[in-house]
Image (cartoon, grey):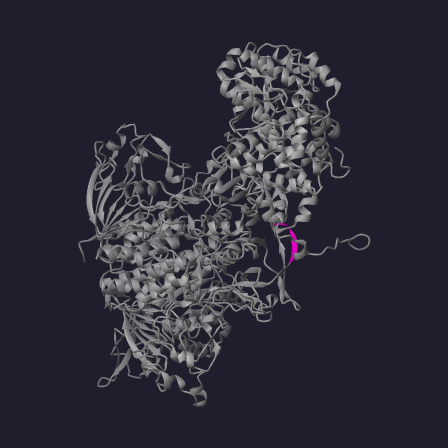
Amino acid sequence: MEEEPRIGVFVCHCGLNIGAVVDAKAVAEYAATLPNVIVSVDNKYTCSDPGQEEIKKAVKNESLNRVIVASCSPRMHEPTFRKAVEEVGLNKYLMEMVNIREHVSWVHMQEKEKATEKAKDLVRMAVMRAALLQALPKKEVTILDRALVIGGGVTGINAALDLANQGFKTYLVEKTPAIGGYMAMLDKTFPTLDCSICILAPMMVDAGNHPNIELLTYSEITKVDGFVGNFKVKVKKKPRYVDMDLCNGCGDCGEVCPVRVPNSFDVNLGKRGAAYVPFPQAVPLKYTIDSENCLNFNYGICQTCQKICPKHAIDFNQAEEEIEIDVGTIVVATGFETYNPAPKREYGYGVYNNVITSIEFERIKNAAGPTHGKVLRPSDGKEPLRVGFIQCVGSRDYRVGHEYCSNVCCMISIKQAVQLKEKHPKAEVYIFAIDIRAFGKGFEEIYRRARDMGVVFIKGRAAEVIEDPKTGNLLVSAEDLYVGKQLEIELDMVVLATALLPRADAKELAQTLNISLGQEGFFLEAHPKLRPVDTFTDGIFLAGASAGPKDVPECVAQGKAAASAAACLMARGKIEIEAITADVDNELCIGCELCTLECPYGAIQMIEELNKAEVIEDVCKGCGTCAAACPQFAIFMKHYTDEQILAQVRAALTDVKERPLIVAFTCNWCSYGGADLAGISRYQYPTNARIIRLMCSGRVDPTFVFEAFKLGADGVLVSGCHIGDCHYATGNYRTETRYIAMKHALKQAGIDPRRLRLEWVSASEGEKFASVIREMVEELEQMPALLPKMERT
Amino acid sequence: MSEKSVLVIGAGVTGIQAALDVANQGIKTYLVEKTPSVGGHMAQLDKTFPTLDCSACILTPKMVDVARHPNIELLTYSEVKEVSGAAGDFTVKIETKPRYIDATKCTGCGHCALHCPVEVLNDFDENIGVRRAIYVPFPQAVPLVYTIDMDNCIECELCKNICEAEAVNFDQESEEIEVNVGSIILATGYDLFDATKLKNYGYGSYDNVLSSLEFERLLSASGPAGGHVFRLSDGKIPRRIAFLQCVGSRDTEHGMPYCSRVCCMYAIKNAILAKDHIHGGCETTIFYIDVRAFGKGFEEFYQNSQIRFGVKFVRGKVGEIAEDVDTNNLIVRVEDTETGQLFEDEFDMVVLSSGLVPSQGSAEINKILNLPIDQYGFFEELNRISPVDTKIEGVYMAGVCESVKDIPDGVGQASAAAMRASLKAI
Amino acid sequence: MTDFALFPGCLIPTRVPSYEVSLRKTAERLGVNFVEMENLTCCAPVGVLSLDYLTSLSLGARNLAIVEEMGLDTMCTPCNGCFEGLDRTATILNKDPETLEKVNEILAEVGKEYNGTITVRHLAEIYYDDVGIDKIKEMMVKPLDALTVGIRPGCHLFRPIEVIGIDYSERYFFLDDLIAATGAESVYYKHRLRCCGGLLRNVSGDIVEGILRKRLIELKEGNVDCVVTVCPLCFLQFDLGQKLVERKFKEKYDLPTLTYSELLGLGMGLSAEELGLQTHRIKVDKLLAKIG
Amino acid sequence: MSEGEYKVPIKEPIKTKDLDPDFKYEIADTYLGRHITACFKCGACTGGCPVGILTEIYKPRQIIGEALLGMREKVLTGGELWLCATCYTCEDRCPQKVNITDVIIALRNMAFREGHTPEALIEQARNMVETGWIQKTTASMDKRREELGLSRLPKMAVEDMQKIVKATGFIKYLYKKEDKK
C-alpha cells in the first residue's frame, strides 16, 4: 500500500427515504470511530449539488484518498459519485457505496433501531473494504460507428431512419419477410383515424432504399458476442428460395401456386399461396416460398412457379446463410404479440364463430384485408348491425397472469366503434369496460364523439358470451354498474380487445443479448426516468412495445430517443468501461489449467513456454469465476480481490448484535437487483442479512463461505441469476457445482448444511428475495446455536 | 464537432435531458430558464410514481450535470426576447434579468437570507412556505446563487453588509446576449389548472382544500414542513384525506375536455405517501371517474395501493364540498355510482387533483415564435409521424408544452427532440 | 330609468298579496315606473313546460308580444317562476328564428306576433342594477342594523348559469349587498343557495317537508332573525310550509319570513300594516319589536 | 335468518327485447334533450342534488344512464322523473355540459304524452286552461287584496289561452280520457 488510507464517510438522509428509518447522524458519528476514517458527515441529499460539493471539498481539504457514500443503490448513483470524486482527482475505483436505502430503510420501516444497527454494520464492512481498494487505470474502448436495429416495426424503422440520417451505417434485422410490423396490419390509427399504411408506407420505402440502412429481412439474431462499442453479431438469413436481386415482385408465382394456406398476416382469416408476399405494400417487395407448405419440398412435385418466373429468380436449393456483422450499438425494437383469448372459455373465442379479436376486426375492416374492407361476420357473412366490444381480455387479469394494463385496447375499441357507426349510424354498438382509459392527446375528443354517435358504454367486465344456436347470434351477460342492473344483450358479433404480450421469443433474445426481463415479461429498462431507453448492458438500447405496451406516437418517440442515445455513444467514439478484470500472479500459478476450463469467454490462456496462465485483458469481462476456482489463490480480481471480500465478511461478523446473522453474497446483475426491487416495492423482511455485492455468483469462493461460518455466521446465502440468465453465460453453473461440494464439506465439519442456501433471484423477483430472507431467518431460529468450538479457532 | 449550436428553452427535467443529449453529441447548447434555478415542477415533488423513487435523487444529479457540462451554457433567470432567421441559422436575443447578486462571487452560503428582514410567500412552495426577499427557491437549487426579489426588497442593505464575498450589487443591470443557433427545442412545461374556477369545490375559500402541488410541497422533505402533513387551518394532523380527480380536466365547462393523464397516478402516489408520512396512519379516499393506470407498472401500483396500503377508491365525481364553519372540516357530497349510494362524508383535508394546462412560459415564447397551437394552448406537431417537430422547421418541442404527459414520456420525448435538433446542427 | 312592464304572475296576486303591495310602494318611492299589463295569460312555468314544450313557449311568447305592443323593451317580474319561464322563452326565441317562426304560426291563431326584442328582468335585478345600492341606502329612514338575515334567493333567479349568466357563489350573492344596503346583516349559513323544494309541493309531501326541514335547521344553525326572499314560492314554503314542518316533526323554528320588498318597506319607515305583514302566517311581532 | 327462509325478489336480467336502442336518439332530437349523449355518467349531478340526498330512489345520473341504455319503459313510467325539483344545480356542475334538468323535462314531455303524469300537475294544467289561473281563485283572495288597497284579481285572457292550447295539441293529451272541451 503506498499511502496510509484516509477515508471520508458521507451518510445520506435522501430526504425522508433513509432519514425517516435510519438515524443517519448516529451512523455518521459511529463511522467516525472506525479506523482510518478522517471525515464522517451526514447530508440531506448527498446526490444533489450541495451534497457533491461537500464530498469534493472534504477530499480537497482533508486530502482523502477513499470516499464512502452510504445512500441509495450503486445501480442508481455509482456513476454520479464516481464522476464527482474524479473531478477532484480521485480515481473512481476508490469510491465505495453502501446501500442503506433499498436494502435497509425501505425494507425495515417498522424496525428503526435494528435498521440503524444494520446500516452501521454495512458502513463498517465498507470501511474495512475501502482500506484495501486500489486505483485502477481508465479502461477505454473505441466504439464502432455502426448500429444494429432488431425489429422492423414502426419503432425500429424510425430508430434506423434517424441513425442513418445522422450518418451511421445501420443494419435493420426483421424476422418476417417484410418490415412494417403490426402497424402494417392496421386499417386506421386512433385518435385521428388516419389511414395506418399511408403513414407507414413512406417510412418503409425510405428505410428500404436509404443508403446507410442495410435491410436484413427474413433473418434472425443467433449469437451476440463482445461488449459495448464492439458487438459481434451472428445473423441467420433464412432461405427465401427466391433470389432477391432478380425478383421484381411481379407476383406471377403467387397467382399460379396451387397451394392455399391461411395467411398469418391476415391473422389466418385470409389465404395465401406457398409463394407469397405478406401484404401488397411489403418492403422489400420480394416473394418468399414457404417450404413447409410448398408441394415441391413436401412431395417433390409442381415447381410451376419456377417454370413460369420470367426472371428465373426461384432457386429451390437456396441454403440458409449466416453472416457476421460488427456494430457499436444495438437498438431492440422487437414489439409485441396479441393474446390468444381461447383459454378464457367464458368468451367462447374459437368456439363461437362470431367472436373475434380486435386485430381480426382490424384486418376485416382493412380494404387490403380478406373481406376487402366490408365488415362481415364470420358465421354467415352477413353485415353485423349489433356489435359488442369486450375490454381487458387477458389484461388486468391475475388469473391469466397478465396484471398490467395494455394501454391501447380502450382506444382501439373506441376507434373501431366509431368506424362502425360512421358506416351504419343506426347500428347498436356496446363497449363493456371497467375504466375507459382515454388519456392521450385527442383521446377524450374521440371518446366524446363515440358517445355522441350513440355508442353505449357499459361499466362492468363482461361476464360471459353464449351463442344462440339457431341464429348464430351471441348473448353477452354483464352487470352495468352505471345503472346497477344485470344485462343480457343479444349481439350479432363480439370483438374481444385482447392484451398486448411480450413476444414468445423475448426470453431467448434476452439471453442472447444478456439483458434482463421485467416482471411482466417485457424487457427491463435501466430506470424508468433516469435512463428510460437504456438497458443494464451498456450499448444496448430499448424502444417501443418491446419494453411495454404503448401506442404508435409513443413508439415513434421512443424509437427516436433510442436512436439519440445510440448516436450519443457513437458520436463520442470511445467509452470508458469497467476496469474490473482478472490478473494471474505467476509465482503462485502452478499451471493446472483449471481456470481456462472455467472461463466462458476463453479470456485466460496458458503460456506454453512458462506453463503459466495469462489473462487477455480486452476479452476478460471480470466475472471472477476463474479466481474462485483457482486452488492456489493465484488469480487477483481487480476491485473484487479475495482480501477485500474477506475483509467485508470479517467486518460483518465482528461485535454481532443480532442473531441469527446471515452473510448474503449477491450478484450485481440479478439478485442484487432483486434485493433493490424488494426495496422499491417496500416488501418488508427481517434485518438479519448483511449483503455483499459481487459481479457474479461464480465469484463466491468456498473459502469465503467457510470463513463466514468459522467467524460465527449463523447462515450464508449465495444468490445469483437463474440458470441461462447469467450475465457471464455460465457463471451460475459453476456456483451450483461448488454449492453441492460445500454442502458435503459442511456436513463433515459438523455444521447443519441447511445453514448454507443457494437461491436464484432475478432482477424482477423482489418478493422472492424478501421471502427467501424471511424463510432463512425462521429456519435458523429453530436451529440450535452454532457449536462454540467453531468460534475458538 | 461543429460551430452550430442548439438552444433549449425551459429547464425542467425535459429541458435538462434534451440539453444533455445534445451536448453529449459534442454540440454547443444554450439552456435558458425563466426562474432562478433549473429543475421545473419535478423539483417540487417528493416522490415519483410508480416506483416511489425519490424525485430529487433522480433530478438533482442531472441538474449538476447540466451546470457542469462543458458544452452547455446555462442561462438562468433569463428569457428569450427575440428569434429571427431560419432552420440552421437562428439568431436569438436572450435577456438575463438582474439578480442584484454577482453570480461569480456568490457561494450560496445563505447568510444573507438569515439576516434578511423581509418574509414573503414562496411560490416554489405553492405559497404554503415562506422565503426571504433574498432567496434561492429550494436548498438544492442549481446554480446555487441567491437572487434578490426587488418587488419585496426594502433595500435595507443588511445582506450587502453581511456577505463576505461582497456578491450583493444593487445596481446590477439586465444583460442581453445574442446567440446564433442551428435549432431550438421548446420545453416550457405546464402550469396547474386554477381550481378557484370550480366554485362548488371551494378552493381558495376553504383553508383545508389544497391543490395537488400544494400537497406535494407538504410531503416534500425539503418542503415548508419537512415532510410532515398538517392542516392549513389549524395545523392539526389530518386523519381523513379525500383526493378528488378530474378537477378541471375532462371538463368542457372550463374549456379543458382533455384528460391530463398524470393525475390518477399522482393521486394514488400521494395517497400512499400520506399514509406513510402521517404517524398513526390516516384514511385516504380517492373519488374518480375512471382510474387511468395505463403505463408500465401503473396497474400493479394501483392494485397495490388498494391491497397493501388500503387506499379507498370511490367511483363518483364529487358534486360539491361544504365547509363546517367551526371545525374547518369539509363535507364532501358524492354519489358512489357503483352502488348508487349517496354519501356525505366528512374529511379533515381535501386534495384536488388539478389538471395540467400549458404554462405561462409557453404563451410568452409563442408571442415571439407564433407557432400554431391547438385550442387548449399546446403546440401542434408537424404530423403524426414526427411528434417532436413543430410547424417551423428547425424548432422542436418536448414535454408537456406539446401535450400532457408524465416524466418518463417527457424524458423520452426530450431525447427524440435532441436527436432531431442535432441533425439540424451538424 | 326606463319604464318596465310589470308582469305580476299568478302566485303573488293570489297567495302573496303582501309582496305585491310592498313592491308597488317601494318601487314608487325608488322612482321605478311600472306599466300595468292586461289581457295576460299564465307565464307557463316549469309545471307546464314539463308537460309540453311548445305550449309553454307559445304562452310565454304571447305575453312577450303584449309588451312589444306596449312599445316597451323590458319586462319586470317579481316571481322566480315567471322569470324562469319567460326568460327561457325570450332567450330561445330571440336566438332561434326557426322556433320563433313555429311559435308565431300558433300566435297567429290569436292574432299576435312576437319579434324577439324583449328582455326579461327580475325585480331583484332592477333593485340592484337600475336603482342601485347607494339610492337604497339614502332611502333608509330606519336602518335595520339590529337584524340578522338569512337570504333565500330562489333557484330560478340565478340558475341555469348558461341561460341567466349571473355570476354567483356560495359565499357571495348580490342579494347580500341589497340586504346590507338596508342596514341588516346577511349571514352566511350552510347550503344557503340550495333548493327549498317548493315545486314538488303536491307531488311528494315527504320530499318537500324533508328538504324544508333541512333548510330550517341550517337557518337555525346560522341563528338568523328572519328569512328574506325574492321568490313567492320560497315565501310560501318558509311561511306556510314552516307550520306544516313544525307540526309534522314536532319542532319549533319560529322564523319569520319577509320578501325583500317588505324588508325595504320597513327600512323606509312604512308600517307593518301598510306592507300587509299581517297576512303572514308566522307572526312578525318579535321582529318588529327588535327593529323598534 | 330467524324464522324461515330469506325472501329474495327473483327477477330476470334485462334482455335486449326490454331495450329500445332508438330512445336516446328520440331524446337527442328534442331541443331540451339535445346533449344527453355527452354524458359519461360520472355522478357529479347526483352528488349535488338536494332531492337525491333525501331519497335513494331519485338519482339524475341513474335516469340518464337508463335512458341512454334504452330502458324506455322504466324511465317514462317509473315516476322518478317527477321528483326533480328543477333547481338546475346539476346543470351547473356537469363536466360535459349536459343540460340534465332540461333532459328530465324532455322525458316528462314524453311521459305526459303517454299518460304517466302525477295528478297534481294535470289538475294545475286543467285549472290554467279552464280559468287561466294555476290555482282556483277564491273570493277571500279578492277580499284580502282590497284590504291591502290592491285592485281585484285581473281577468286572464282565457279564450286566447284555449285557442293556443288547442293549436299546439296540448289539449288532446290533457283531456284524453273523458274528452271534455
Image coords of residue B266 (percent x, y): 46, 49
| Residue C23 is a magenta residue | no
Q: Residue at x 60, y 19 (%)?
A: C37
Residue A185 location, x and y as percent?
A: 43, 66
Nearer to me, A744 or A789? A744
Quarter in which the C terminus of chain A is drawn: bottom left
Above or below: residue C12 compared with residue A434? above
* Magenta extent: A482-488
Q: Is residue A485 magenta?
A: yes
Q: Residue furthest left?
A: B3
User: How many numbered marks does the figure carry?
Assistant: 0
Q: Is D1 displayed left or right of A686 in the figure? A: right
> Which image quarter holds the N terminus of chain A?
bottom left
The answer to whether one can see residue B162 in this image is: yes
Q: Quadrant of residue C186?
A: top right
Q: Position of residue B316 (x, y in %)?
A: 57, 46
Is B53 situated above or below D96?
below
Nearer to me, A715 or A327: A327
Query: In the image, is A753 to the left or to the right of D131?
Result: left
- Left or right, B13 with respect to A448, comes to left
In the displayed structure, would residue B172 be above or below residue A380?
above
Residue A13 seen from this side: no
Instruction: Name the image quarter holding residue A736.
Output: bottom left
Q: Is residue D179 left or right of residue B218?
A: right
Using the image as rendered, state which of residue B407 and residue A638 is in the foreground. B407
Residue C240 vs residue D172, the one in the foreground? D172
Q: Residue furthest bottom?
A: A300
Looking at the image, which residue sits at the far right? D3
